[in-house]
Image: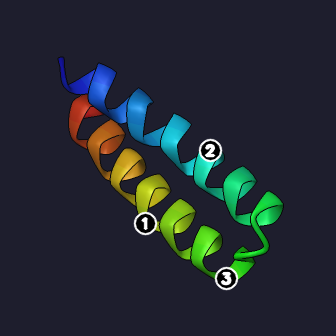
Amino acid sequence: MLKRVADWFEKVSVAAFAVGIFQGQLVLGLIVAAAALMISLILTRKIGG
């Protein structure tokens, strides 16, 4: 279950970056994308041991 959540956060990070670009909110998109990617990496590290 935790792996699915980590994968979801990874997808959210890509989507946030894309939406930020296309909506003209690059800085906000980058902030949300970076936060989601960090959460994904933390969860992935937790799964890996």
Give the residue at mark 2: 15
Residue 22 falls left or right of residue 34:
right
Mark 3 in CB contact with mark 2 (< 8 angstroms): no
Secondary element at image label 2: helix
Q: Nearer the viewer, residue 43 or 17?
A: 17
Q: Amino acid at mark 2?
A: Ala
Q: Residue at x 22, y 41 (%)?
A: 46
Disc number for residue 35: 1
Q: CA distance from mark 1 to mark 3?
A: 12 Å
Report x, y in % for residue 31: 54, 75
- Above or below, comparing residue 28 to residue 1 in the picture: below
Residue 18 falls left or right of residue 10:
right
Secondary element at image label 3: helix
Q: Amino acid at mark 1?
A: Ala
- Above or below, comparing residue 37 to residue 24 in the picture: above
Reading the chain from its start, which is encountered first: label 3 or label 2? Answer: 2
